[in-house]
Image: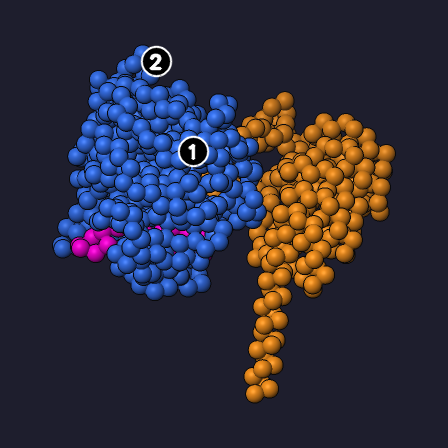
Chain colours: A orange, B blue
């Protein structure tokens, strides 16, 4: 009898913990500080996760609940969380939704300074970049990358902060022969994704334009290798008729000309 | 030979229904989008009134499609007390709901098909919406359905309403909170969009929401619940399709956790298939003894051609793209918002950015992939008739493309205002619902 009762008791506890964790996730998302406090006092796990890998802090932060974020940070919740679907860092949706004060709280606690700088540099908000720089210094590579992005985006105030923090001037683009550049011009399609990309040359610079979207001036690193730092696009030509595009963790092959 | 005859008959089932001029639900007969027997114009000019039979102003904001029975057109709408409410069109990935918490009136309107004159209108509900909407959706997104006697309008959290075709309220049902929205953050509510489907004496509604999703059938006569089947699903927006062949019917639903087949008479689950996208918006189509289901939210963007009559778990084994139950499949290329269309021997998919891809329906071999026009954003589903595909853009253009193995653009027309609702066909009329007007395109 005792052998039966013990597993039953353990199961009941696990069920309760599961419910409490679900409730904590819901309360954090809703910004219900009283419920968050109560649930954690009753043993709900600060690092519990949704099926998409979002923690209570992740949910409170992406919804801009500053008081809940402060409380969870005080409880030691980690900021170093990427969700499992979008693979987005905690700061990603916070910045997209313009929760600037929450962003500052997360940056101040962030242990991954390079990631934090990478996340905030695209916003063009100098106060966020300054918050990153106020903590432990990011790596030289991260500083240089953020600086080049800021220059490309013409974010003078951010670029100035990064320069003062020790960012190096980006190397000049590789001088690609005009004939080689011209050979890349054309419309490309991928078998992998229904997107067309138009390559053209403007004032000696290769321009990449997904059809229906804006143009991106690509920086040449070699006769075949081009990047667009702010968008994190990496293009490697295999010849005049095809290239490989790397972006967002994906690799896509493109070929010139009309698809069948 | 029998199979061949059956195959031809399958293709013709929806076509015959549309030839009456009836377009009874979202995407017409059987949700096919097909209006063979119809002969709508290839070109028109709204400003010069060339090939414009009439234009009717429809108040409010709605992405629901018009439906037609006999000489009547039925439309639904939601009228905000805030006159500035509109869609945010274009290609973007933002997830936030539209900032619209104003009081609304939900209405059903009947129009005269010959003149566009409003014959009757009924207010189904009034109040502040119980859930928010996506910036390019509306509070009246599901299309109505009719069998020529009853018109059913589904307004999500605001309920299910049945009227006689003369406009008398027959019954209404509260189906609970339909908080369809982003799987990643339920506070980003986008609103219900799955349309009701009439089957025999019942109306079937797919209610996929954040918790306790279900699909249910209600008696057309009095709204009595005939069956209800729980669905272990997160929010979805596609409309169920009832595929019929040789006296056998199966109802197919798109969904994230699984694409499912059901017995539409009982709601019993017949088969499941995965994997599928985290957001599913498209409506299945059928023909050639196959059911075609697509979804397009990355990274999983599948296209499946499922053999009718299958049972059990149809999920393909690792590394396989076909099986006894799956004629062919693709891991990428599925469309996101516009539903696919099967017309003749080809399955056509339109992507949100206007890239049209045609596949041989029986084999999945790609016939062509071509951009429709120089850009734009595409939400409405394509429809087809008289050998042509009609593809509307959010910018208000309607491209007419010749059906077949090769891409041929026949015309580009504009209605001069955003189009997000899927157009309808009725006889020689093409009905295009814009942001403010219903355009009856055809000879006067």
Is label 2 on the same chain as label 1? yes
Determine whether B394 is above or below A72 in the image: above
Q: Measured from the top left, where is residue A89 in percent x and y?
A: 67, 48
- Location of residue A164 by image quarter: top right
Query: Is residue B250 a member of the stretch shown in magenta?
Result: yes
The residue lying at 63 percent from left, 29 percent from top is A217
In magenta stretch: residue B223: no
Q: Nearer the viewer, residue B121 or B261?
A: B121
Q: Nearer the viewer, mark 2 or mark 1?
A: 1
- Residue in the image at 61% along x and 81% along y: A6
Residue A53, position as x, y percentages in the image: 61, 56
Position of the N terminus of chain B, as image quadrant, is bottom left
Circle 2 chain: B
The chain identifier of the residue carrying mark 1 reads: B
Residue extending furthest toward the top: B48
Magenta span main SS: strand
Q: Which residue is mark 1?
A: B126
Q: Are marks 2 and 1 in contact (CB under 8 Å)?
A: no
Left or right: B30, with A171 as reference point: left
Q: Nearer the viewer, residue B328 or A257?
A: B328
SS at badge 1: strand
Magenta stretch, residue numbers? B242-259
Q: Identify the residue position indicated by label 2 in the image.
A: B47
Which of disc 1 and disc 2 is earlier in sequence?
2
Label 1, residues with CA under 10 Å away: few <14, some 14-19, many ≥20: some
In x, y percent, where is residue A222?
67, 38
Instruction: Tell me: residue B428, above or below residue A83.
Output: above
- Residue at figure coordinates x 18%, y 55% from the top left: B247
Residue farthest toward the bottom in the current orientation of the protein: A1
């Amino acid at each position: 009898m005792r052998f039966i009762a013990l597993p039953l008791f353990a199961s009941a506890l696990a069920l309760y913990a599961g419910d409490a964790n679900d409730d904590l996730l819901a309360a954090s998302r809703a910004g219900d500080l009283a419920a968050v406090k109560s649930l954690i006092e009753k043993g709900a796990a600060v690092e519990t996760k949704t099926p998409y890998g979002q923690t209570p802090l992740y949910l409170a932060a992406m919804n801009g609940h500053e008081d809940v974020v402060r409380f969870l940070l005080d409880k030691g919740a980690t900021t170093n969380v990427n969700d499992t679907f979008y693979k987005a860092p905690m700061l990603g949706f916070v910045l997209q939704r313009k929760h600037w004060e929450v962003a500052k709280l997360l940056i101040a606690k962030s242990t991954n300074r390079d990631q934090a700088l990478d996340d905030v540099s695209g916003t063009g908000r100098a106060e966020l970049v300054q918050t990153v720089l106020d903590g432990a210094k990011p790596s030289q590579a991260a500083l240089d990358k953020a600086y080049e992005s800021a220059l490309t985006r013409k974010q003078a105030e951010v670029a100035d902060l990064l320069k003062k923090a020790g960012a190096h001037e980006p190397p000049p683009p590789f001088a690609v022969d005009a004939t080689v550049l011209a050979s890349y011009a054309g419309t490309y399609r991928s078998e992998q994704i229904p997107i067309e990309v138009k390559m053209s040359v403007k004032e000696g610079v290769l321009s990449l334009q997904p059809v229906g979207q804006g143009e991106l001036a690509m920086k040449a690193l070699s006769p075949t290798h081009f990047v667009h730092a702010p968008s994190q696009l990496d293009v490697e030509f295999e010849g005049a008729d095809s290239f490989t595009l790397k972006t967002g963790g994906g690799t896509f092959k493109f070929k010139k000309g009309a698809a069948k | 030979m029998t199979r061949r005859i059956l195959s031809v008959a399958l293709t013709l089932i929806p076509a015959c229904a549309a030839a009456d001029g009836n377009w009874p639900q979202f995407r017409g007969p059987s949700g096919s989008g097909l209006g063979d027997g119809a002969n709508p114009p290839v070109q028109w000019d709204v400003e010069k009134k060339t090939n414009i039979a009439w234009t009717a102003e429809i108040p409010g904001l709605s992405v629901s499609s018009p439906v037609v029975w006999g000489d009547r057109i039925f439309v639904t709408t939601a009228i905000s007390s805030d006159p500035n409410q509109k869609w945010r069109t274009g290609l973007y990935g933002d997830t936030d709901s539209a900032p619209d918490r104003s009081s609304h009136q939900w209405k059903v309107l009947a129009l005269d098909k010959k003149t566009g004159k409003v014959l009757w209108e009924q207010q189904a509900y009034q109040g502040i919406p119980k859930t928010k909407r996506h910036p390019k959706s509306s509070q009246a997104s599901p299309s109505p359905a009719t069998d020529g006697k009853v018109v059913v309008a589904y307004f999500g959290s605001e309920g299910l309403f049945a009227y006689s075709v003369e406009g008398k309220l027959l019954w209404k049902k509260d189906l609970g909170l339909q908080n369809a929205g982003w799987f990643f953050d339920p506070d980003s509510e986008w609103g219900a969009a799955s349309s009701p489907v009439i089957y025999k004496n019942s109306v079937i509604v797919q209610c996929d929401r954040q918790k306790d999703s279900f699909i249910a059938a209600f008696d057309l006569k009095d709204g009595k619940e005939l069956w209800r089947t729980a669905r272990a699903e997160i929010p979805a927006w596609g409309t169920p399709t009832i595929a019929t062949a040789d006296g056998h019917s199966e109802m197919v639903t798109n969904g994230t956790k699984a694409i499912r087949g059901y017995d539409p008479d009982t709601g019993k689950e017949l088969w499941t298939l995965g994997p599928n996208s985290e957001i599913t918006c498209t409506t299945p189509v059928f023909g050639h003894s196959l059911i075609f289901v697509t979804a397009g939210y990355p990274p999983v963007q599948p296209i499946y051609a499922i053999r009718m009559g299958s049972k059990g778990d149809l999920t393909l084994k690792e590394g396989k793209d076909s099986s006894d139950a799956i004629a062919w499949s693709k891991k990428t290329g599925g469309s996101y918002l516009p539903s696919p269309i099967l017309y003749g021997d080809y399955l056509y998919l339109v992507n949100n950015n206007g890239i049209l891809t045609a596949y041989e329906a029986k084999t999945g071999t790609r016939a062509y992939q071509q951009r429709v026009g120089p850009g734009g954003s595409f939400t409405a589903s394509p429809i087809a008739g008289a050998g042509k595909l009609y593809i509307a853009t959010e910018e208000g253009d309607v491209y007419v493309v010749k059906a077949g193995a090769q891409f041929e653009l026949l015309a580009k027309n504009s209605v001069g205002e955003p189009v997000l609702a899927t157009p309808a066909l009725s006889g020689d009329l093409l009905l295009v619902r814009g942001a403010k007007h219903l355009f009856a395109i055809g000879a006067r």
